[in-house]
Image: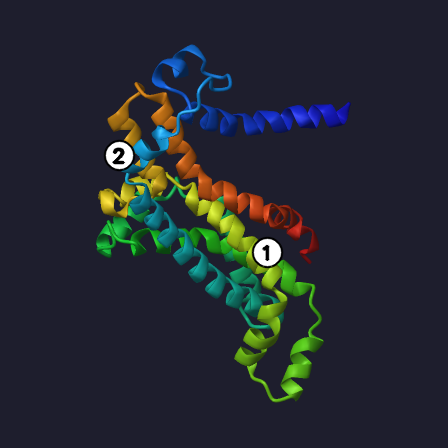
Amino acid sequence: MSRIFWIAVGCTFLFPLYWMITMSLKSKSEAYSNPFGIPQSWRWDSFGEALSKYHYFTYLENSLIYTVGTIVITLTTGSMLAYCLSRMQWKLNTSVLFYVSMGLIVPIEVVVIPLFQLIKLLHLKNSYLGLILPYSGFAIASCVLMLYAFLRSLPKELEEAACIDGTNVYQAFFKIIFPIIMPALVTQCVLIFIRIWNEFPLAFIVASRDQFRPLTVGLLSFFVNVGVSDWGLIGATMFLSSLPMIIVYMVGNEKIENALTAGAILK
């Protein structure tokens, strides 16, 4: 009985994907007469029209730049900070860990106005760094805490043996610790990708020019221009925008499940 219940719950999550795919393959008239059923005749021309009217590849490139840039900065700085907090003893260790953990309870919407003023002051509005730097700042808290928990489970004899062999702190981190925490880093890559790819409020405010808009903001401007007259075109555009996310989730869903239980090893 419980299996049937969870299958039903899973179907409710899959329904939006089903709706996007079926709607993109219908004509204008069929989209209104048969909104939820299987298309009677499959029409693929909506995808070509979406690619020609909707600046898909420009928005896709921008989203990739924001996502990859955030991942690189967050994982580089976050892994180093987590290593310092978990493996080294220094005066402000506990205070810094508490300060980083506070970043988990501050949503981006709460500080969007002062953040926007700061971005304007630094002349970063309508630039890639104007979004990459704030994204990295908000993503680093969860990255540090997850890697901190992972590193606390490793024996300190690893660094002690490396020091006996003549390695310094940086060599021990990059040559010994970094390869060991690679599974946790891959998990963070998937989580950061999903978070940044779907982010809308800050991108809508900072990236006002079309050449810097990610897919989420570009999709809104496309809907405003098209309206609700062609649901087949809207469904095709939504599916194209969701396709990279679907691929990443299918590849990294196991990593996401591991991330949900990563906090269990926090000491």
Q: From the viewer's side, name the closer residue of 42 and 209.
A: 42
Q: Position of residue 75 (x, y in %)?
A: 49, 61
Query: For this rendering, which residue is in front, 105 or 20?
Result: 20
Count residues near mark 2 (Cα–Cα under 10 Å), then give few for <14, some for 14-19, many for 20+. Answer: few
Q: Quadrant of the C terminus?
A: bottom right
Q: Earlier in the sequence, mark 1 or mark 2?
A: 2
Q: Residue at position x 67%, y 56% from top? A: 266
Name the residue at 36% across, 13% down.
29
Residue that lies at the very extreme toward the front in this rendered image: 41
| Tag 2: amino acid | Lys
Of residue 31 and residue 145, the one placed in the foreground of this image is 31
Between residue 244 and residue 24, name the one nearer to us.
24
Q: Quadrant of residue 6?
A: top right
Can you give x and y, in whole percent of width and height, for residue 233 in the image?
34, 27
- Where is residue 136, by image quadrant? bottom left
Q: Is residue 88 above or below residue 162?
A: above
- Give the amino acid type for the residue marked by disc 1 in the picture: Met
Residue 145 showing in the rendered view: no
Residue situated furthest top in the rendering: 33
Q: How many marks?
A: 2
- Residue 135's x, y, as percent? 40, 51
In the image, taking residue 41 as reference, residue 59 lies left or right, namely left
The colouring scheme, among rainbow, by chain, secondary structure or one colour, is: rainbow
Question: Callout 1 environment at 10 Å: few (<14), some (14 to 19), or many (20+)?
Answer: many
* Residue with the mark numbered 1: 146
Q: Is residue 16 above or below residue 157?
A: above
Between the residue at mark 1 and the residue at mark 2, the CA separation in whole angstroms equals 42 Å
Q: In the structure shown, which secondary structural element does the residue marked by tag 2 occupy?
A: helix
Give percent across and percent down for residue 22.
47, 24
Q: Which residue is mark 2?
A: 53
The residue sitting at 57% across, 63% down in the picture is 94
